[in-house]
Amino acid sequence: MNTLLTEEEVAKHLHVSLASIRRWRLERRGPQFIKVGSLVRYRPEDLEFWLASLPTGGAQLVKAETAANGQRYRGAVKVMSS
């Protein structure tokens, strides 16, 4: 049988507040959850899948550095100033 995580365990694992976990659930933007009666539980694999699907910040850092050097971006395409 799979181990299910509580809201508190997920919040601790992600280093966020319990209120954040609950708000994400209400806004349908957090990890997938299951209900066991009135209890909310999370499968570890659903949490890992959700984490893997989040965007990373590496591309944004490149854009910020390039913008600081006088080059501009439009969307994902670099536009060089003449």
Image: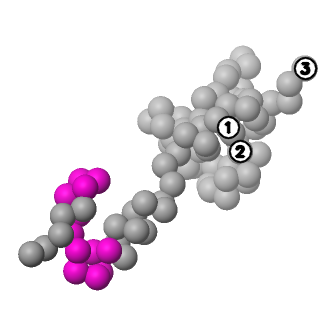
Residue 23 or residue 47, whichever sits in front: 47
- Label 3: state its secondary structure: loop
The label number, if any, that marks residue 1 in the structure image: 3
Residue 70 seen by the camera:
yes
- Few, some or many C-alpha atoms within 10 Å of disc 3 (few <14, some 14-19, many ≥20)? few
User: Residue at the location (67% across, 53% down)?
Assistant: 14
Asked if residue 38 can be seen in this view, the reply is no
State which quarter of the image contains the C terminus. bottom left
Residue labelled with disc 1: 47
Q: Earlier in the sequence, mark 3 or mark 2?
A: 3
Question: Identity of the amino acid at label 2?
Answer: Val
Magenta stretch: give its range.
66-77
Q: Is residue 75 left or right of residue 36?
A: left
Distance of label 3 from label 2 (alpha carbons): 19 Å
- Measured as percent of width and height from the top left, residue 31 is found at 59, 35
> At 61% across and 42% down in the image, what residue appears?
52
Is the residue under label 1 in contact with that under label 2 (CB below 8 Å)?
yes
Inter-mark Cα distance, 3 to 1: 17 Å
Between 55 and 16, which is closer to the camera in this rendering?
Answer: 55
- Residue beneath disc 2: 10
Tell me if residue 14 comes above or below residue 33 in the rendering: below
What amino acid is found at the position of numbered circle 3 in the picture?
Answer: Met
